[in-house]
Image (spheres, rainbow, N blue to C red):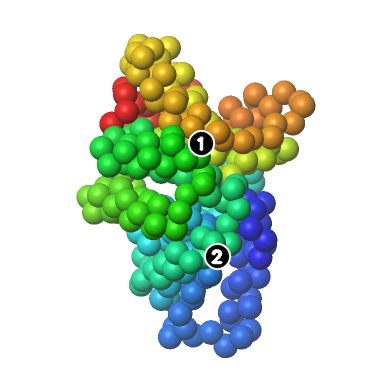
Amino acid sequence: MGVSEQNKTMASLDHILETFLKGGGSRKTVVMPVGGGIVANTYGLAAGLLFRGIRLVQCPTSFLNAHDAAASSQKQAINHTGYKNIVGLYHVPTMALIDTSFYETLGVTELKAGLGELTKNAALFGGQHYELIKKTTMTKGVALSGDDLVEATYIGLGAKDMLLAIDPKEKHLALLFEYGHTVGHALELTQGVRTSHGEGVTIGMLAASYISNKMGIMSDADREAHDALVLALDPQIEIPKRDITEEVLDKVMHDNKRGYLPEREGFCPFILNQRIG
């Protein structure tokens, strides 16, 4: 299957299910997607649906998927009708096999995609997550060594495990991981916009810090320090010439995380931050 958000569809899912069944798959079959997050999500959903759940072994090949989703996340989903991860379920991988030598095949965009989620962790948790970004993107950009990336993978996994141990279905405390995602997801799925997931998240972080600052939650100085994390990554985004404001806002209002917590009609809940950490 293709590896863009436009390929994470019902058609791709149906193809996987049909291939599985026609190929003689059974309850004993192990589904093992080898690839990035698009592949992992779509095949993960198929594994959760087949026979009401068969074994799933994730083998991530992207930096982002390795530390952010494959090893610890139960969430499996596809996009539908222009909305992100709107059709899905929870299905726990039996295991994840992470081979960091795959990172040698990645380009700058793929590295930034993974570093974007780590930048989010730095803003949320501070501590070692902030120190990681200070000695990587804020010092070296994306010119990171293999050892740098291995350390970043371990630290990223630690952030996920810290909250997923308490909230494995990400409906309460682990909603913190959605920081930057409300706007980031909306941009990813807006027609004509091109950006990686991680870069989109960091741009969403800038939107969140702007809102926090305007609401008096984040001071000017704290916003400057927060936004410096994002600017060090230098996220790239291609935006069409037409006005996309209404389209982005529509997707924001249909964010797939809505409904877990009480909200007022006509308002959109956001994860906001006071300061780094």
**Residue at 76% from the left image edge and 26% from the top image edge:** 242
Q: Quadrant of residue 185?
A: top right
Query: Could you tell me if residue 207 is visible in this image?
Result: yes
Question: 201 or 16: nearer the eye?
Answer: 201
35 up-or-down from 267: above or below = below
The outermost residue toward the left is 166
The amino acid type of the residue labelled 1 equals Leu
* Count of labels in the image: 2
Residue 107, percent from left and from top: 60, 53
Q: Quadrant of residue 72?
A: bottom left
Residue 165, percent from left and from top: 24, 54
**Residue at 41% from the left image edge and 70% from the top image edge:** 97
Q: Which label was assigned to residue 35? A: 2
Residue 85, percent from left and from top: 52, 49
Question: 144 or 30: nearer the eye?
Answer: 144
Query: Could you tell me if residue 167 is visible in this image?
Result: no
